[in-house]
Image (cartoon, helix red, strand yellow):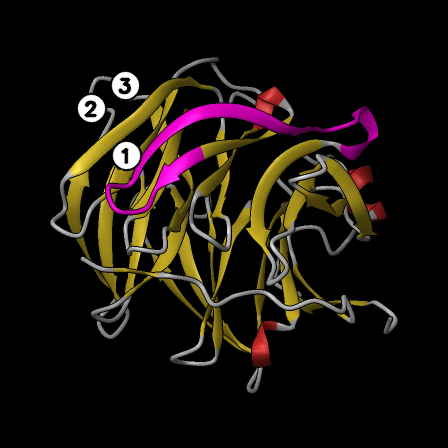
């Protein structure tokens, strides 16, 4: 097994860096700063960062087949045209909950964009409970709600055979599995796969690797953990130099690099002095496993 190397490749510090996704069309890493209200693209060959400022907090970003991106911003699903940085609303959710915002999101194997909501944070990971829901934006821009009573809707991904959807509601401290009908996009039979230990922190963003194992970013836990969802146990832990790890995604050549976002929101001066690269983006190499290309929204 090759030795694991961790480096901070994006040293710009984001309040809540999140939702990394590799855009193979441009050879760039796309990600958001939630409360900084920005979608950013980092080009590893030039080390240049481009960003688009939005009018509301932006929870997640995903590729769009017709070009540009789809974003979950405020309580609106929107299209982001990168050429002129224009934002076009596609559908709204939670209109009866003005204090809600979108959080993490991802596109399923059929091109539907899933994203969940939560109430605005009072402090990091402190929210009004049970205010969120999980939604799907279909290619025709119609929206379906899967379930509600969610605290902090977070990481999502699908098994390699597309029959299972994995999902995290952070304050449950669990990674859940649901039966998934890829033809209709419907979910059922939700159950726990793994419950995090106290020292592992709060489960945040998540991705799957080419071997069908899950990687979970551990907020306040300073690590990403690799879970075998069949065995329901952690099979690998990679510790990072900052505590507030938010999400992880594979990218780069052959999807053999892992990119990990982080945050500095909620850290006092002493904490930030101890971890000066909090809010940066890390690249992990030498994991000995590859990821799979992200899906693009079909609408």
**Disc 1 element:** loop
Pick the front one: 299 or 49: 299
Q: Which residues are magenta?
A: 179-200
Disc number for residue 255: none
The residue located at (76%, 46%) in the rendering is 223
Q: Earlier in the sequence, mark 3 or mark 1?
A: 1
**Left or right of residue 192, residue 116 in this image:** left
Mark 1, residues whose alpha carbon is within 10 Å: few (<14), some, or many (≥20)? many
Q: Name above or below for residue 296 compared with residue 153.
A: below
Residue at the disc numbered 3: 97
Could you tell me if the residues under marks 3 and 1 are in contact, i.e. CB atoms within 8 Å?
yes
Could you tell me if the residues under marks 2 and 1 are in contact, i.e. CB atoms within 8 Å?
yes
| Quadrant hosting residue 75 | top left
Q: How many numbered discs, if any?
A: 3
Q: CA distance from mark 2 to mark 1?
A: 8 Å
Residue at the disc numbered 2: 95
Q: Is residue 76 magenta?
A: no
Residue at the disc numbered 1: 75
The residue located at (57%, 86%) in the rendering is 45
**Disc 2 element:** loop
Image coordinates of residue 129 in percent, x first then y, are: 48, 13
- Would residue 205 be visible to someone looking at this image? yes
Q: CA distance from mark 3 to mark 1?
A: 9 Å
- Would residue 15 be visible to someone looking at this image? no
């Amino acid at each position: 097994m090759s030795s694991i190397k961790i480096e901070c490749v994006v040293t710009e510090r984001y309040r809540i860096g999140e939702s990394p996704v590799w855009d193979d069309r441009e050879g760039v890493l796309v990600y958001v700063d939630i409360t900084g209200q920005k979608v950013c693209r980092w080009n590893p060959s030039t080390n240049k960062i481009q960003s688009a400022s939005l009018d509301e907090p932006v929870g997640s970003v995903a590729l769009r087949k017709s070009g540009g991106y789809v974003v979950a911003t405020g309580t609106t699903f929107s299209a982001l045209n990168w050429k002129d940085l224009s934002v076009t609303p596609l559908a709204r959710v939670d209109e009866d909950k003005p204090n809600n915002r979108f959080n993490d999101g991802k596109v399923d194997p059929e091109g539907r964009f899933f994203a969940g909501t939560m109430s605005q944070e009072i402090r990091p990971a402190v929210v009004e409970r049970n205010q969120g829901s999980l939604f799907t934006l279909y290619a025709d821009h119609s929206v379906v709600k899967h379930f509600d009573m969610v605290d902090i809707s977070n990481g999502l991904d699908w098994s390699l055979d597309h029959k299972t959807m994995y999902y995290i509601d952070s304050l449950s401290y669990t990674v859940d599995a649901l039966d998934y009908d890829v033809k209709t996009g419907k979910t059922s039979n939700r159950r726990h796969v793994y419950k995090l230990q106290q020292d592992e922190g709060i489960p945040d963003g998540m991705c799957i690797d080419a071997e069908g194992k899950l990687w979970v970013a551990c907020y306040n836990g300073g690590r990403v953990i690799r879970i075998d969802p069949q065995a329901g146990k952690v099979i690998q832990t990679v510790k990072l130099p900052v505590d507030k790890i938010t999400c992880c995604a594979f990218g780069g050549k052959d999807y053999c690099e892992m990119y990990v976002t982080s945050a500095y929101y909620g850290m006092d001066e002493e904490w930030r002095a101890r971890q000066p690269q909090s809010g940066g983006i890390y690249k992990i190499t030498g994991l000995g496993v590859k990821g799979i290309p992200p899906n693009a929204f079909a609408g």
